Amino acid sequence: MYIYMYSSHAISSQSIPRSREFTSSYQMANLQSMTTGPSVIPTTHPSNPTGHSMGVHPLVPTGPSMPISAAPTMGSGSASMGAAVNPSMSAAAVVHPTVATAVTPHQKMQLIKSERHLFSSSDDSMVMRQIIATHSPDGRDIDTRPLLRVIEDVLHNATPTVIVATPPDMEVVGDRMQYAGTVGMLEALAYTIHRISCEISCKCTGGGDAHATTVVLFNQLSNYSWDAKVVLALAAFAVSYGEFWLTAQLYTVNPLAKSVAMLKQVPDILEHTDVLKPRFDALNNLIKSMLDVTKCIIEFKELPTQYISPDNSPMSTALTHIPTAVYWTIRSIVACASQIIGLIGLGHEYLSSTTEAWELSSLAHKVNNIHGHLTKQLSLCHNHIDEKKHIEAYQTLVRLFDTIHVDNMKILKALINNKEDLPLIEGLTKKRVSVDVLRRKIVILFISDLDISREELFILTQIYNDHLSTGKLERHYEMVWLPVLDKSAPWTNSKQEAFNRLVSDMPWCSLYHPTILDAAVIKYIKEVWRFDKKPMLVVLDSQGRLVCPNALHMMWIWGSLAYPFSSTREEALWRDETWRLELLVDEIDPLILKWIKEDRFICLYGGEDIDWIRRFTSAMHHVVQETRIPLEMVYVGKSNPRERVRRAVAVIAEEKLSGYWQDPVMMWFFWVRLESMLHSKMQAGRNIDNDPIMQEVMQMMSFDGSEEGWAVVSRGSAEIVKAHGRKIVDCLGKFEEWKGGVERDGLVHALTAALVPYETHEHCTRLILPGDTGRIQDNVICAECRKPMEKYILYRCCTD
């Protein structure tokens, strides 16, 4: 920690529109970074030793019967890749779909192999220009999210399994009510989906070029937005994919399914599921990647336009990526469809091929790479939106506190959490409750992090329960703990344990979890109320108005007597206060209050220098013996009752030097109250020139900042004198010189007069305040010489 240290020396002086369309040519800019990246996929394959891009047209086996070098290839330089064929390609490779049923399986495999290619990165820009040229949206807006949910159900339930018996109570999957909101939209889109599904089946059956097929689909989907294109294409694939696996699953129990399965040779396929497992796994991985990208694209469309526009940097970057993402997703749909269609009527040689699994994995890697880019941009967009929302919520809080309300509900719901029905834990029952339990009550917001000292919690609990000791049935205020934590830091088990422990010890309400506190509220607490780690008590009246920015100092000084804990009440309490021993001790030690009422002589002293303690107590005992005055002496330690103070207490007890406070909490509270007095006066703009109590408090605090001891001697409540370390020991050592004044004026007055000669101009006064105490005055006057004190920053690590 760091602390502020003020020092005074007497010898010397010294801070997007709704459609989300993407038509501009600059969308090519990020294509290379989208579709390439660190790859774990090898650049060559056993069947392609040249390392050239192999095609992703599925079901393209590689084996002894047809080396890849023997397969004719398609060109990649045509301006219209969907229509033109490279002249170097053999005539046998150009087959109309209607002729496909007449060719032999061996010829069919040659056709499929011949189109195994992915265009190179040098052609990416040209291809995407071709794709974007097909984009001509007519403004129709389709809610693609419900349709995607139906597609996901199909793809998740379409698995290579066989139902061997019909359960008597087979559950009906996909209840119509589940898709009630989708039926109308599906009725409007059914023809489009069917047309695209037929196009995919036709092109893939004929062994067409994958890119050319993809371009055809883009032409058919030209009037739709980018997200609608990919979802409609995915729906078309889901129809054929779902039909295939539905037949495969039911052919053993349903006569119709059995007949259709025989026509498609499904039993033969399922007999080789072990051989086809790598391909099915690769197919499932690619489908998952396609769904991930599709969801990402839809999320971009659903981003709230009031918080982010196409011109915002994360969004504009994402918009350049989406056409590429849509292209490769539809390209992958074509590849997956070709895999399923290619399974029909092929022999064991093809079924045993592993090339297709490798190619699908390559394509899945590419789509995953695209998804990674989109996810990163989506995260940046969400950050931008969150920031805008936080600013809006912060400004709403500011306006709420500037507005007069009938009760405190609007303010409290905005602060605590207006999205949760039961955001609080009640103190006694530990049950979840709503904010309504605080309606029309004075509410004290206990704001802190998880680092609350045992002493603070103990004293605050005593004050909170003070009404029980006075016989009152209820208190007229309620307290709520708002734990303020760094949202960027991970929530760990140790933090959860600390939070649970604190909640269990608190008799007042608290948030049921720190993470529900909105970031805008945290910003308001830190910037407006100036919270900085050290606990504070913000008081709101029954209408939600701020009546005290921090009543902790007031609470420490006067306890429940400070009710209703407003700044006005604080001023009134100070007006009626004087410098007296009751103000110093209050109810920390009831025995001392009893001595005060009995008008006894009392001496409070502190410090941690054992030698000084021995000399001082010895000198004071000598005065008591000489004057026969009954004096009660109590050691009150230092503001940080660490090991050295505990050693001092042990010596005092063993040698019977004086009385002492056994509980370190009492010592801690004694000094916290003094510090609170100082801060209360500082916040009120007081100084030692116009406030005698502040002068006395500053002297006490400077005593604690020194390495020597100090003492306060009083009789009853009114007579009081204090002195520092060596001065009072030297003065007591010459008691014989002022002994007569004790009999004439009394001990306190005689000691006051005897200390005057020891007050020299040479002194070194240090006032040490914790660095997290909030607003501290830059100009602090020395209580000894009335000169400005120098300000230092002291870093201390004290382990004793």
Image (tube, rainbow, N blue to C red):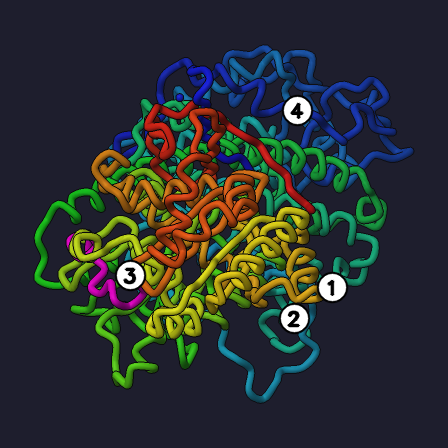
What secondary structure is the magenta-colored segment mainly?
Answer: helix
- Upstream in sequence: badge 2 or badge 1: 2
Q: Is residue 344 left or right of residue 302?
A: right
Q: Considering the numbered disc 4 on the image, is that residue within a helix, a strand or a loop?
A: loop
In front of the other: label 3 or label 2? 3
Q: Which residue is mark 1?
A: 267
Q: Residues within 10 Å of mark 3 (few under 14, many from 20)?
A: many
Q: Is residue 776 above or below residue 618?
A: above
Number of callouts in the render?
A: 4
Using the numbered discs, state the Cα–Cα distance from disc 2 to disc 1 in whole angstroms. 8 Å
User: Which mark identifies residue 444?
Assistant: 3
| Crowding at mark 1 (Cα within 10 Å: few <14, some 14-19, many 20+) | some
Numbered range of the magenta stretch: 558-570
Query: Amino acid under label 1?
Result: Pro
In this orientation, which residue lies closer to the viewer: 190 or 556? Answer: 556
Left or right of 1, for residue 789? left
* Sequence-earlier tag: 4 or 1: 4
Q: Name the amino acid, label 4.
A: Gly
Instruction: Give the mark nearest the N terminus, 3 or 4.
Output: 4
Question: To which residue does mark 4 refer?
Answer: 37
